[in-house]
Image: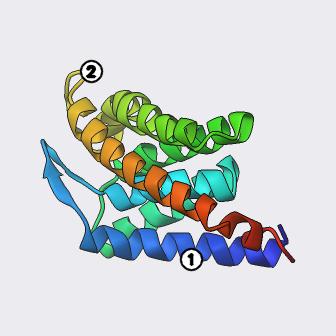
Amino acid sequence: MKRTKLLVLMAMFTAIGTYGSTLLWFPAGIAKAYPVQHALNVIAGVILGPIPAVIIAFATSLLRNLLGTGSLLAFPGSMIGALLAGYLFHKTSKPILAALGEFVGTGIIASLVAVPYASVFLGAKTGALFYLPSFAVSSFAGSIIGLVLVSRLVKIKSFQMLNQN
């Protein structure tokens, strides 16, 4: 994929993630669930690969924090899931494993990473599994949405159009 097209797609996904989080969210335990970010992690991981997906997750988290619509927990929550989603898809070419990677990366691994991260950056003293329910609900919902959208994109052959010059 040419560099300009890659940058345009990354910017588009970042914009969708930033704006989409203001439109679609729901309370999930102690946090708010933003399934749009998790769906985009799956889609970006499949279409663009793990590194661009992580960059998109970082940029979206940064913009959401600057706009006051996100918290510092958005960084580990989105970036770990994006990395695992993209990595698993590009190793197996199976969209279901990208969705599973997003769920495991965000719902389990990032929720555990969030405990010391929140302690250092937010001053929050919590137990090891404190963030797990919220992260798991949010990433599960987004992973399912992302899997459905990726499956539809494959059926209408959108991936072939993206890889043309």
Residue assigned mark 1: 12
Tally of marks: 2
Q: Which numbered circle lies on residue 128?
A: 2
Q: Quadrant of the C terminus?
A: bottom right
Left or right: 137, with 59 as reference point: left
Vertical arrangement, residue 117 with respect to residue 48, above or below: above
Q: Is residue 21 visible?
A: yes
Identified by mark 2, the residue type is: Ala
> Which one is nearer the viewer's eye here, 96 or 4?
96
The residue shown at (12%, 42%) is 29
Q: Position of residue 75 (x, y in %)?
A: 43, 50
Q: Secondary structure at mark 1?
A: helix
Q: Quadrant of residue 104?
A: top left
Image coords of residue 85 (percent x, y):
56, 42
> Within 10 Å of the Cα at label 1, are there few (<14), some (14-19), or many (20+) other Cα atoms?
few
At label 1, the amino acid type is: Met
Q: Are marks 1 and 2 in contact (CB under 8 Å)?
A: no
